[in-house]
């Protein structure tokens, strides 16, 4: 049996096409998932345009943000049955034996391979998923919103686990891409106020969305002085600066905007190596934190937040299309016409 899938086949810009591939065979501990919806991640777009900073196992089916229905279960699978509605975590392979795996931080396992770059992903009718990756979702949560759980989990980990936010904290988010906007939303839910989202002129529509998601102030860094605005609200600087820009350079700005004894959390990354003034890190006694991926308890909380629509997930979806429309779905995100595209295979 074959199916169509969005396949990246080379490390060149737009070496991606819709291909007929076999429906995967599953192992004893896997389920075969009928994909309900798969959202396009900034990382899928980076891979398609060959601007990513991680190794890719070619050829590979793209897509790691997905929801669906269990179509078949392997022999040893318990707890999930045919017809169950689920979302899947992204750590398709982990060693299961290292200290990080054994303490529930398997997202940081050095052997980790994720869907969509290391293992075939979900931009297809069916995807093979280890049952340990699954979370049940309520009937009240449609697939088109449930697939957004993964980027929500990235934002939750960044703002609510790896950072500390108290109500009334001044929080700055650099970069209003999908992750930056969701980080802003999580900060708003955690009580950040003022909450300042910083972008560029081309980000104008995204900055408007930031307001819908709870930003008290939005700043165009090409026309306004970010430092003045932040210090006008909080003279010592921000309690927390989240760098979700997806570039390396803005770490400089983040370190400068943080108050003494404040925090900087970096969640966006790029292949660029740039010189940065690290002295404020020491001089201001800052806590610099990276944030990567997510784990089980984060997913359970995010599914609840999504089901209650507390994160206003509809605000970030600008395009929904069948799998055949993948090219426009990617281009619309690449060109900044929509924040997030969702494919319904
Ligand atoms: Zn993603
Ligand atoms: Zn491990």
Image (tube, rainbow, N blue to C red):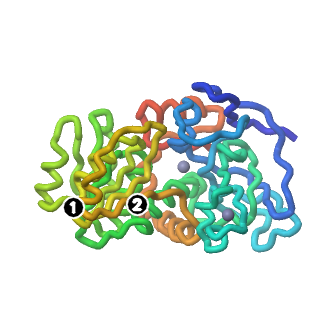
Dot 1 or dot 2: first in sequence order is: 1
What x and y, as percent, mark residue 90? Answer: 63, 56
Write down the quadrant of residue 184 in the picture.
bottom left
Q: Quadrant of ligand 2?
A: bottom right
What x and y, as percent, mark residue 1? Answer: 87, 41
- Judging by the rendered image, the residue that carries numbered circle 2 is 289
Question: Depth check: 5 or 15 in front?
Answer: 15
**Crowd around label 2: few <14 · some 14–19 · many ≥20 (10 Å):** some
Q: Secondary structure at mark 1?
A: strand
What x and y, as percent, mark residue 241? Answer: 30, 57
Quarter of the picture containing the C terminus is: top right
Q: Do labels 1 and 2 touch, CB within 8 Å?
A: no
Question: Depth check: 281 or 17 in front?
Answer: 281
**Crowd around label 1: few <14 · some 14–19 · many ≥20 (10 Å):** many
- Above or below residue 180? Residue 324 is above
Cβ of disc 2 within 8 Å of ligand 1? no
Q: Secondary structure at mark 2?
A: strand
Image mark for residue 187:
none
Which residue is depicted at the point 76% across and 73% down?
79
Question: Depth check: 154 or 309 in front?
Answer: 154
Q: How many marks?
A: 2
What x and y, as percent, mark residue 22? Answer: 83, 40
Cβ of disc 1 within 8 Å of ligand 1? no
Which residue is depicted at the point 47% across and 33% down?
334
- Judging by the rendered image, the residue that carries numbered circle 1 is 259
């Amino acid at each position: 049996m074959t199916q169509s899938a969005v396949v990246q086949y080379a490390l060149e810009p737009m070496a991606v096409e819709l291909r007929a591939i076999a429906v995967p065979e599953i192992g004893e501990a896997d389920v075969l998932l009928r994909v309900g919806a798969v959202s396009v991640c900034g990382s899928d777009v980076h891979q398609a345009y060959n601007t990513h900073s991680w190794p890719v196992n070619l050829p590979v089916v793209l897509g790691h943000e997905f929801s669906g229905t269990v179509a078949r279960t392997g022999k040893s699978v318990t707890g999930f049955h045919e017809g169950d509605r689920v979302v899947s975590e992204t750590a398709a392979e982990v060693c299961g034996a290292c200290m990080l795996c054994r303490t529930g931080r398997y997202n940081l396992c050095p052997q980790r391979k994720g869907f969509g770059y290391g293992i075939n992903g979900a931009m297809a009718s069916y995807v093979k998923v280890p049952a340990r990756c699954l979370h049940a979702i309520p009937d009240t949560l449609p697939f088109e919103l449930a697939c957004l759980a993964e980027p929500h989990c990235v934002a939750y980990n960044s703002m609510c686990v790896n950072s500390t936010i108290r109500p009334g904290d001044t929080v700055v988010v650099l970069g209003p891409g999908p992750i930056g906007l969701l980080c802003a939303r999580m900060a708003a839910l955690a009580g950040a106020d003022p909450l300042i989202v910083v972008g560029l002129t081309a980000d104008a529509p995204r900055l408007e969305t930031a307001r819908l998601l709870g930003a008290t102030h939005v700043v165009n860094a090409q026309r306004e002085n970010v430092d003045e605005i932040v210090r006008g609200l909080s003279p010592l600087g921000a309690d927390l600066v989240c760098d979700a820009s997806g570039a390396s350079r803005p770490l400089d700005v983040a370190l400068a905007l943080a108050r003494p004894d404040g925090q900087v959390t970096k969640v966006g990354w790029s292949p660029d190596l740039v010189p940065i003034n690290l002295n404020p890190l020491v001089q201001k006694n800052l806590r610099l934190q990276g944030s990567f991926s997510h784990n089980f308890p984060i997913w359970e909380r995010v599914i609840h937040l999504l089901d209650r629509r507390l994160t206003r997930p509809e605000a970030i979806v600008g395009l929904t299309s069948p799998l055949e429309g993948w090219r426009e779905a990617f281009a619309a995100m690449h060109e900044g016409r929509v924040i997030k595209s969702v494919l319904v295979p």
